[in-house]
Image (cartoon, rainbow, N blue to C red):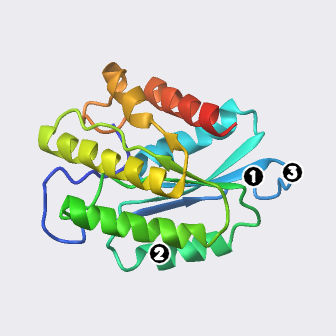
Amino acid sequence: MSEFIYETNTISKILEDYEWDNVWWEQTNNETAKRILYIGDSISCGTRRLVTSLSKSEILCDGFGTSKALDNPHFKPSLELFMKQQSKCDAILFNNGLHGWHLSDEEYEKYYDEMLLFLRKAEKPIFIVLTTDVVMNQSHNEIVKARNEIAKGLARKYHFPVIDLHTVASNNAEYHDPDGVHFNAKGYELLAKCILESIA
């Protein structure tokens, strides 16, 4: 079972019942390897260290995982503080789609676009990471599909490459945890391999 909380209900409030941030700097004294910042949710937390491991530490994957929805006013300030503490960053991976069920598609696109504009200030290559599927909740899964289309549209707008974790996850449903959202070790390994192949 995952150590992270997933909001199973479609609530109408900005905050979920349980909010969390999970931050990680990988091998802080290694100044020679390529270093990326992976901004995401619990799925990013489950894959980031595997990216480093599978690359044999040639790519270090720092992480800012959070349950914050895109309209959370503390998202950008928290992320900005994290980024100021990074000694080096060669690329940014961005994903946010499994939280903030209160957002309409229009609101989601607006706040996603605003976040990309914020991230562009770092002047680093940005990769859009598509959100993985939700097996046990069809209504949430439909929202995820719509959000991925929005993310792909914004990727085209800004000419950002896309990392399609959704296809990997949906084609390997047997590797989901019983909660239908998170993954077992094999599932996270497949996602990490997809990321590594996209950024190497």
Query: Disc 1 to disc 3, how far (Cα)?
Result: 11 Å
Q: Residue 85 location, x and y as percent?
A: 68, 72
Q: Residues within 10 Å of mark 3 (few under 14, many from 20)?
A: few
The C terminus lies in quadrant: top right
Residue at the spot of label 3: 32
Q: Is residue 118 above or below residue 38?
A: below
Give the residue type that dot 3 points to: Thr
Residue type beneath disc 1: Gln
Where does label 2 land, which residue?
76
Give neighbour class at mark 1: few <14, some 14-19, many 20+ (Cα, 10 Å). Answer: some
Marked residue nearer the N-terminal end (2 or 3): 3
Residue 69 in sight here? no
Residue at 54% of width from left, 51% of height from top?
A: 160
Q: Secondary structure at mark 3?
A: loop
The three-letter code of the residue at mark 2 reads Lys
Label 1 belongs to which residue?
Answer: 27
